[in-house]
Image (cartoon, rainbow, N blue to C red):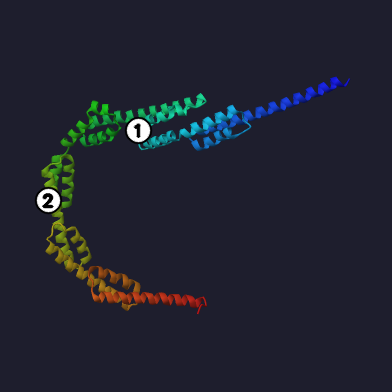
Amino acid sequence: YWKPILYSLILMLALIETGISQSGLNSNDALFRQYIEAGKAELKAKNGATARISFQKAWDNSAFTKEQQDTGQKLYYKAKNLDPYFSMLEEAEGHITAGDYKSAVNLLKRSEKHLYSSSIRFPEEELDNFFSNELNDKIDKAEQQRLKIVNEGYQKAEAALKSNPALALETLQQIAPQMEPQELAQFQVYRKIDQIKVDLNYESYLTQGQEAMEAKNYSVARDLFLKAWELTSSQEIYQLILDAENAICRADLEQSKREMELNNYEYALELLEKSAECATNEELEALQENAMSNVYDEYLVQGKRALEEENFQVAWSTLKKARRNKTTSEVETLIKKAESGIKYENYLQLGLEAEEKGEF
């Protein structure tokens, strides 16, 4: 009588236990896929560190099967090996932002070895396909943009060659770094650049510079000669540049003398520094000594006045300026007096502050 009942109870318990066990397996499988999918999503977003965290959870969880843990481990190391690839992608994006598509294409192509290396093949084909397609798409888009810049730039340069050679030159110089060696050879870009430089307004710059020299606009003349030099680096232009710079120097020297007559001694000193190359040592030293002596006298008078007014800080800084132009025992004495006054004021202030705090 009891045996059938007992067998029924045993069978019921077995079925319950099997159901619980199966439920646990299903739960573990779901958690494992959750970790894997989260890691894959982060990896696709180029968040390698975050992806590795998810893969490591799948690797470290003892509740998962050995096969599942092995998969997590493989994905972890594959994700880690992609760090150099992600860095190269980021660098390539920087080139693209800067408009340097040739460098971007070259860098993206070099990144292929990191992506297609056998050490980075993924257990799941989906990831390999995703990264492969993504990289190919980036290379294609960057190359298309490079070709667009090159073609449009070359057409613009060709159109401007006769009417605006300067624009043609500028455009060719801009697109040349984006061109491949075979393209440069095919379109003879550098030969055209050299020819445009020769054909540009060399004579115009030369004539304008000579006219500016005659009008004593020496700085203008020098700038025009420098522009001509950029077009044709001839000995003639080099000598004209030297002549213009020497004229500027002589003009500064003469202006310094006029400034001294107007008692503008500090400005005169600035001009004399610019005139060092065209003045004789004796002339330069005499003018500088005269200017510095007068600057000294001006600061000395100001410093004494500040001392009389007990404005010791102003006196000290003014007298230091005087000493920079000429060192005398008088100015040294006055500087010490100003320093003593500053110390006195500092001690006085400290004493007053102590008195306010009741610290006698």
| Horizontal side, residue 311 vs residue 219: left or right | right
From this view, report whether residue 29 is shown above or below residue 283: above
Q: Residue shown at 22%/32% (left/top)?
A: 190
Q: Amino acid at mark 1?
A: Tyr
Q: Position of residue 329 (x, y in %)?
A: 24, 76
Q: Residues within 10 Å of mark 1 (few under 14, many from 20)?
A: many
1 and 2 marks in contact (CB < 8 Å): no
Q: Position of residue 268 (x, y in %)?
A: 19, 63
Q: Is residue 93 above or below residue 355?
A: above
> Quarter holding the N terminus?
top right
Q: Which residue occupies 18% across, 51% down?
A: 219
Identify the disc placed on residue 243: 2
Nearest the viewer among 300 and 50 is 50
Is 67 on the left or on the right of 121, as rendered?
right
Foreground: disc 1 or disc 2: 1
Residue at 20% x, 35% y is 165
75 or 238, which lies in front? Answer: 75
